[in-house]
Image (tube, helix red, strand yellow):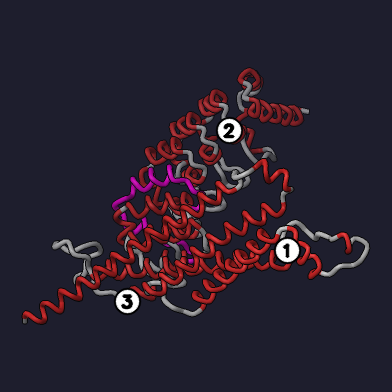
Amino acid sequence: MEIKMEDDNITELHDASEKGCMVTLHRLIQKDPHILDKISLTDFNETPLHISALLGHVDFTRALLALKPQLAMDLDFHKRCPLHLASANGHVEIVHALLRANEDACPVCDQDGRTPLHYAAMRGKVEVVKALIFAKHDLTRVVFDGGETVLHLCVKYNQLGTLKLLVETVKDDGEFLNSKDHDGGNTILHIAVMLKQIEIVKFLLSVSKVKEEANALNWMGFTALDVLEHSPKDFKRFTLQNILMDAGVERANNQNNLPPPSATMIGHHESGKPTQLSKQRSLKHKSNWIKELRGALMVVATVIATMTYQPALSPPNGVWLTQACRNTTCDARTWAFDLHVNYQYLFLSFLVSNTITFTASLSVIFLLFSGFPLKNKFFMIILTLAMCTTLIFLSITYVLAFILMIPEKVRKELKQLTLLPIIALVSLILLVFLIYIILSIISLLRMIFKFILRCAKALIC
């Protein structure tokens, strides 16, 4: 009977810890002053302090610690102490209370090898992180079973705030900042690039000790830039590529081909002239840009060719039947003839414009397939002419198709309103094309002028 009463009291104590009920706690303590000492004899997976710290009951937690400070070191079924739970949930006041009771709870590792600091960093609890590293300055350097540091966790869980705080405490320790995990030998820079965390990558490359080892290899022999090359192509990848290359990060297979640091500096010489290394990076960046431009032009030209091919087979406004064909089966030629008769000028203009667009887009595809380099000026002029022609006549085709589809009464009411967007687009294209022609003429005149100067110098000599 007495054992049954003790079990009921402990159960009630756990219920009180869930609610944070101080009245129940004081009543149970008065009823049984040794009730907290009997907790370890029960089958509960956690102590009332675990529950109170998890749920954020500050007064209840302080009362339990005042009665029995040793509870701060008790572990639950997952080998977590109350400080683990309070840290993960960001209960700063409870963290301070637990640290005052026993600072030795800071380095306690759970069954996954994680300390309270690891959980606070993973959840972005900056104030808790401050309290923990103030209590134990070397806590940041604790490494758990997978070889990951707390910095790895900050990056994996995209917690830039806690990462900045922790890096500040170990910014002079290059070995720790660039330590590798056991899964793939990845540094925090590798992981940040792998997860395409742009802001974190920018921050890491601003840390001198990290930037010095930015070309570190993981176990697959990849630098951070190599890791990026194996990720899906999107806007983030293009942005990160620029950031990494500007910071001096190279691909693994190119590092041995570069001049030694003593021969060339990363930026510019004291004379202000670009170094060989900076020129190589500029050429690589330009090469990547040209490849992406070629692919984008190919996609645009293919889409336009597909768009213009379909109207040639099925012109706008559906199948129009003549009076002679209403009760008979008419083929496409009869329908096309009827469309041609009713709207002769518009229909012919539509067919001509659509054909020109289709031909010009195919020309762009052919030019891109031909393998001519985009940096060739003559090739770029032809390609630009073809693209401008494609866009202009595509716009005209759209207007003509729009006019053919709407009723004549509505067309008269709209008047010139339907032409305004297309006029604006054509004007923009022509303006760009005109600027391009002017720049080409200027470039040609410069070449002629330089040629004349050379000839003059040769005659003088």
Residue in the picture at 38% in, 52% down? 202
Q: Is residue 432 visible?
A: yes
Q: Amino acid at mark 2?
A: Leu
Q: Where is residue 287, by image quadrant?
A: bottom left
Q: Amino acid at mark 3?
A: Asn
Q: Residue furthest right?
A: 327
Residue in the picture at 39% in, 38% down? 135
Q: Earlier in the sequence, mark 1 or mark 3?
A: 3
Q: CA distance from mark 1 to mark 3?
A: 68 Å
Q: Earlier in the sequence, mark 2 or mark 1?
A: 2
Q: Where is residue 365, by image quadrant?
A: bottom right
The segment highlighted magenta reads 156-184
Q: CA distance from mark 2 to mark 3?
A: 58 Å
Q: CA distance from mark 2 to mark 1?
A: 88 Å
As rendered, which of 139 and 156 lies closer to the eye? 156
> Under tag 1, what secondary structure?
helix
**Residue annotated with mark 2:** 49
